[in-house]
Each structure stands twice: as structure tokens, then as C-alpha cells.
Amino acid sequence: MLTRVFEKQLAVAGDPRAHPPRVALAEWSAIVSVLAMSPAITSAAEPTRNGGPDQRSNILFVILDDVGADQLRVSNPLGVGLAHTPTITAIAQQGVNFTNCWAMPECSPSRVCFFTGRFPMRTGVVSPMTQPTLPQSQCSPLEATTPRLLTQAGYSSMLIGKFHIAQSDWNPAGIAAPASCGFTNFNGTLLGAPPYIDPTIAGQATRSDGVGLSCGLPIEGNAPAICACGFQDGTCAEGVDALECLQLGGVPLVDSAGNAVRSCANYSSAAIAWGNFNGNYVWPRTVNSGDVAYQESPVRVYADTDQALHAVQFIRAQRALSHRWMCTLSFSGDHDPWQPPPAQLLPPGSAWPTDLPLVCDEETGVKSATPAQRELSNRTIESMDQQIRHVLIATGLAHEGGAGLTLTAPDTVIVVVGDNGSFLTTVRAPFNPVRAKATVYQTGVCVPLVIAGGPTVAPGRACDSMVSVVDLFELWGELAGIDVRAAVPEGRRLDSRGMKGYLTTPDAANARQFNYSGYAAAHLAEQCFPCLLSLGGGPICTDSILTTQQLCESQGGVWYGPGGSTIYTDCCDLMKGLAIEGELTFVYAAQQAITDGRWKLVVNTLPWCVDESKAHEFYDLAACPFAEVLHGRGVDNPECNLLASDHPLAPPAALAYTQLKARLAELEATAQPCPGDATMNGVVNALDIGVLMAYWGGPSVCDFNNDATTNAQDLGILLGNYGVCGAP
């Protein structure tokens, strides 16, 4: 039945290329001609076919937004109340479950890692783009990204869903940002999260408290209300579940007080604010197709459903043509704000708890939205799991029978990964919600990773070798017959390590001697201000995430920036102004972590009001809580910090501490800034001048002094550093 529904949805999805272009890319021809001179585009190695059948693999790459290791059974054996994910479990059972994978702590840096094989300290994408970010902290159009290399190897590639490695704001490519990074076939969203939920229900409700409307639909009791459903063409249907109404592209009718209206008698399409976004149900689509880019806004289709349908459309077309392909399916859910997904996308028995209010954001009269957020997060993950199943079955990559889901395409590798740790209130025990996304602690960087198909042997096993998300870049090359180290321009450092050996050899040696994660402050077009939260162990202050008033307050926080009752410049200023002593927890603006697999060093860039003794933290993960069930690496809670004690480190710990500090220093030494080196090849020369001139007069990656304009001052910086980077 589900397959028939999915087929029907696919039939009416339409071809996005049929829509008229909104922005022509011809204006970028000068820049493209400069880029064409770069080895990033011209040096991809020819795929290896050995004169016989093409042994290369197709790639289905699925990204789960904000799904940390704590959320899935495959990566959290101790978890209670986790989402039901039979599809991901089936992929792991027929492939390899990587139990020791680190991502960056936030989404944009991880996503750039996927497609460049380079740590954030090299790409400049060091934090998420939650507010207007200057181009030098977005993915550079000169990066040798995976789609560029795959195109030269004869692959067709498409990215569907969340992009978030560059923005349209302040980016000279605008809504063509995906194409500027090599993703010339893109259909999805440039937003970093679903749009905010609309508590006015398309402008109908005028009351200010929003109680019962926080999900963007009327709620009665613990369920969506039954109401009349209005459509933009003027038609109206009565007796419709409000959630189903949104899924059908309509608007649930409510009165000004937010109460469900059950009659269509007085319905007027003109009274509805059809342009209002509403979370995952009403959102802006961006398309880059060949040499055009355009937007459709708003789209009135549940985002994850829409993304899965376009994935099916693309994969079917490539399989019909016998093309080699890579499809990146980057789901928008499980990211705040959460809404209930369509009921038919959930597994049987996934009913809302009868004792829990159905709320999507913190509301007046609701003591805590945390349990609801966890339930909504679970259902979003379950919905994504079902969507993955739909894609596999509808494209012939799998079939379902008495034995459950069976993968049936040996020429295709399926990869499912989380992009960073889970967000605060959704974190599952035994992981630590205070040390979650936006921190380099285990909860913030440990992510699920399962891979199946293609050259995989001995399926159903776990691999505990250290893996970083940068390694996926090298895996894409290995699967496509590309030597990425020969394909990437000389002088541009890669941090990736080969992964194919883990699939083909069960006892493959660990390709990594250490793993790294980190984030820092981006070059922003606007100043950040503090947000004060209360979660578990006391007040938490951040001036680097939750960077707008709406984002802060949607998490139950108090905003201390413009629009708030009081303005503080940063968290230290706030602590002093509110006379908070001792108990305030900081989300540091920059952190790094490095591990050898057992010992872990954390380096914090401290606010001015924090004692320098907290700059370094050191953990023996094997001795941290729950190590025995978390594959030998426990949760690095504060009490496990070996440097918090006055006692000297024992000899094995002291040696590991010294070695990790040296490793981190070596890594940092290979990523020293090189002002003027727009092409990132370690040399400032005429090619960099050509790129700078192509961007003259606006913001760009050549804006070396970060003033949002590429001009003579930047040219002066470039000329002052002419030659080999670091040379005297």
C-alpha cells in the first residue's frame, strides 16, 4: 500500500526543470573561465576500468540532520525510547556499522568535509551559517568538490534537500551558490533549518500567546484538530485532519482565537496569507539545473517527502540510462523546529503518548517542551527511515519480503551518516545534553555511520576503527576509481584517509592514528549576542549558537541582544551584568578535540572572564561512564577531566597528553593562514589576482580584510604576500 501511495506521489511530483528560470548564470562566465584554469577542475584522474567491466559503484549518500550517535540503536546500544529505524538497521545488518565515527560539532563544517576531504581550519567553514556569513566562511567556489571530480569521471550527481555549505546572502553567486561549488544539479533548500513554524496558521489567528498553535496547525487534546481545509484555488473540504490538510497543500481553517473552524461556508482564499512559511510543510525551494538557478516559494509539500521523491526521480533516470551516479539525499528533518510528520510516513504503532501535550515549541502554560521535542524528534527520524525505505524500494535498490528489507543492487553503495551530535533537548541517555551539538565532547561529535553494498564483504559486522567525516570524500573517489590525491590541485592539503579497505577487508588496519574535530568563530556580517538557557545542571550561555532572538526564544531561552529587555555584548558581559557567579556554563566560541582512540584532548578558546586553567581538558575515554557499552569510549562528562584534579597525571596519561598536544600543534602548523591565496594551493600568484579581479567590488572569498568588499585593499594584501606561503 505504501509503495502504491509513493508511486502516486512520484507521478504528480513533476519535473523541476519545467519551471521557468529565475536567475541566469551567464553572468558568472568570467568567473567560471578563471576557475577552469584551476587544477581543481582539470586534474581529475581517469577512472580505472582495467580494460574490463566497469567495477565502479553508484553512490546513494543519505545525510541525517542533527542525528547524533545517541539517537540510533546501531550507535547507542544502551539507549531507551529511541526511534524505530528498521531501514537503517537493515542497512547496517547487510553492511558495516562504523562505531567510532567523528563529525564536526556543527552541520556546515561537517558537510563541507563530506565533499572536500579537508578539515574546517583549511576550508574556512568553521561554524554553521545560522546568520549572514561572509563568503570566506562559506565553501569556496574554488574547492575541488566531489561533484566536480565525479563529473570528470563520467558520473551524474545530484544533491537533494538541505545544502548549507554556502548561503545566498553575501555570496556573489546568490541562489546559484550550489552550482558555484560544483553542485550544478541541486533541488532543495538553502536554509540551515526548516523555516519557523507559523503560529498564526497563515495569518488567521491573531492572539499573541500561541497556545495550541505551536505546531503550525490547530491541536485539540493531544492530536491535530478535525477542521475545514482551504486550498489556494478556492476549494475547501470539511472533516479533514489538520495535519493531513497541511500535507495536501492546504491550510487548516481556524478563527482569530486559533480554534478549529469546521465549516467551509465562509471560506475565502483571499483571507489566507499563502506566503507564510510553516516549518517542513511550507518552505522555499531552490533549484540549480545546468546553467540556470531559480526559486519556488513557497512549496506546500512536506519537505522530507519531497526530497525522497526527487531522489527516486533522479536515480530511476540514471539507472534507465545505465549511467554511473551519485545521489546525495540530505534530509531537512530532524532539525529544530520540529513538527509532526505525516501520519502515513510513520511505522505502525507510532502513536503520540496520551499523557503528553502535542506541542512543537516552548509555550505559555507548558512547563517544559523537552519531552515533546524528544517525541517529535523520534517521529521525524522514523519518518526519514521510512523515506529511505521508499527510495530503496521504488528505485529497485532493495525489495521487501518475508525476510524484511533486502538490498538488491550490488553496483550501488549506500551510506547513511549523521552530520553532527544531537541538539540539546533531544539528546538521549547516556549521552550528555549539556555537552551536545556545538561542542567537541563525545555527544557533540560522535555520529552514526552505516555503509552497505558495492564491494562490501562479510556483511553484518561492526568496524571500530577511527573514522572522520572527511574520509567520506576519499571513499567517493575510491568507489568512482578516482585518485583524489592526484585529482586535487597540488599544494592543497587533504585530511581524508581511505575507507574502502574497511569494506573489503574485515580486519583492515586502522587508517588513522588520530581523529580531530573542531569549530571556531566565522566571519560574520552581523554581530552575535548572548542567549541564556536553562537545561538540567543550571544556566547555559551561548553567544555563538542560537544567534537570533527568534532562534533563542524558540528554545525557551532569554535573548540579550537587540529586541530584548537588556543588551549584553557577550556571555561574560551578561554574567557580570546579571551577577551570576560560579554556576554559569559557557558554550565556547571555539573548541578543538583530538584523540588517539582512547585518550582525548580538548582545547577551549576561553571567554575573557573564564580562568585560563580551563583551556585544556583531558580524558581517558576508556574510564569514562558507560565505556563498557559504548564500544570502549565513555561519555566525557566534567568529572572525568583528568586535569581538573590537583594530582599529576599518571605516566601513561602524561605521555598521551604530551603526544596529543604535539599532534594538534603539528596539525595547526599545516593550516597557517596565507592571506591572498584564494586558490588554496600554498602559492600567491597571478591566478589569485585573476580570481580577485573577477569578484571586484563585492563580497567574495578574496575579501581578505573581511569588510564585505573585494577592492584595492584586498589586492594590496595579496601583493604583499606574493609568492610561496610562509616563505621569508
Image (tube, rainbow, N blue to C red):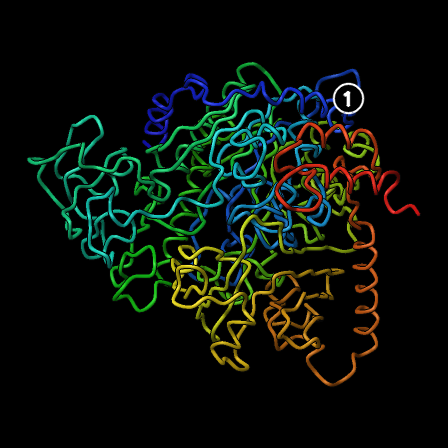
Of residues 326 and 42, the one drawn nearer to the viewer in this rendering: 42
Q: Residue at left 56%, top 19%?
A: 291
Of residues 79 and 535, the one drawn nearer to the viewer in this rendering: 535
Q: Residue at left 15%, top 43%?
A: 227
Of the residues shown, which amino acid type is indicated by label 1? Glu
How many callouts does the rendering have? Answer: 1
Residue where numbered disc 1 is placed? 46
Residue 203: x and y, percent? 23, 43
Residue 357: x and y, percent? 26, 60
Q: Secondary structure at mark 1?
A: loop
- Horizontal side of 540 relative to 466 (left or right) equals left
In the displayed orientation, state which residue is furthest to the left: 265
Q: Can see residue 158?
A: yes
- Horizontal side of 252 relative to 667 (left or right) equals left
Residue 682: x and y, percent? 83, 40
* Quarter where residue 354 is shown: bottom left
In the displayed orientation, state which residue is furthest to the right: 728
- Horizontal side of 608 relative to 571 (left or right) equals right
Is 603 located above or below residue 163 in the figure? below
Of residues 400 and 37, the one drawn nearer to the viewer in this rendering: 37
Q: Residues within 10 Å of mark 1 (few under 14, many from 20)?
A: some
